Amino acid sequence: MKLMEQLNQLDRLDALIRRKATGRPKDLAERLAVSERTIYNLLEILRLLGAEIDFCRARGSYYYQNEIKFRFDLVVRGSEEKKMRGGKKKNGKKVDTENFLQGILAFLDGGLMKAV
């Protein structure tokens, strides 16, 4: 999965959780056009970032148990800030998103990344 695609999915999932409008995992997977397994993986990433997420059976939605805020942006800092779009720098140079994503996931697995 491309880094920007995963960041976008995390952002969409976060917004749905905030509105308590996710639906059940199967429905959520269809809504985000991903597999149920991907939904569970995305939820796990949010949990690794410090979110306490639970599922309300009465409402049929995931919700946050704690106050937490995420901002899923990717900014490259250098002589000028450049936002990443679609796995490429603004100036057109290709970025190895697969290796970059693996590095981020390894970083997350170490529990070092915190929510904003």
Image: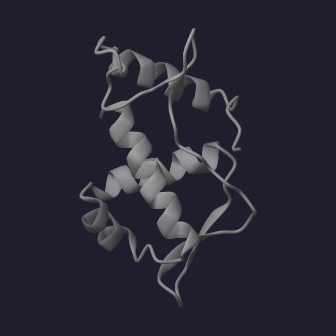
Horizontal relation, residue 27 to residue 8: left or right: left
Q: Nearer the viewer, residue 36 or 72?
A: 72
What residue appears at the point 35 percent right and 31 percent down from the top-left corner?
85
Q: Quadrant of the N terminus?
A: top left
Horizontal relation, residue 92 to residue 78: left or right: left
Q: Nearer the viewer, residue 1 or 74?
A: 74
The spot of residue 46 in percent (x, y) is 57, 49
The extreme bottom residue here reads: 58
Above or below: residue 44 compared with residue 92? below
The extreme right residue here reads: 67
The spot of residue 45 in percent (x, y) is 53, 44
What residue appears at the point 31 percent right and 69 percent down from the top-left corner?
26
Q: How many marks?
A: 0
Above or below: residue 7 compared with residue 91? below
Q: Quadrant of the C terminus?
A: top right
Horizontal relation, residue 112 to residue 41: left or right: right
Above or below: residue 56 compared with residue 114? below
Horizontal relation, residue 28 to residue 62: left or right: left
Above or below: residue 2 compared with residue 18? above
The spot of residue 28 in percent (x, y) is 35, 68
Q: Nearer the viewer, residue 106 or 97?
A: 97
Q: How is the image coloured?
A: one colour
What residue appears at the point 64 percent right and 43 percent down from the top-left corner?
49
What residue appears at the point 70 percent right and 28 percent down from the top-left corner?
112
Q: Nearer the viewer, residue 108 or 80?
A: 80
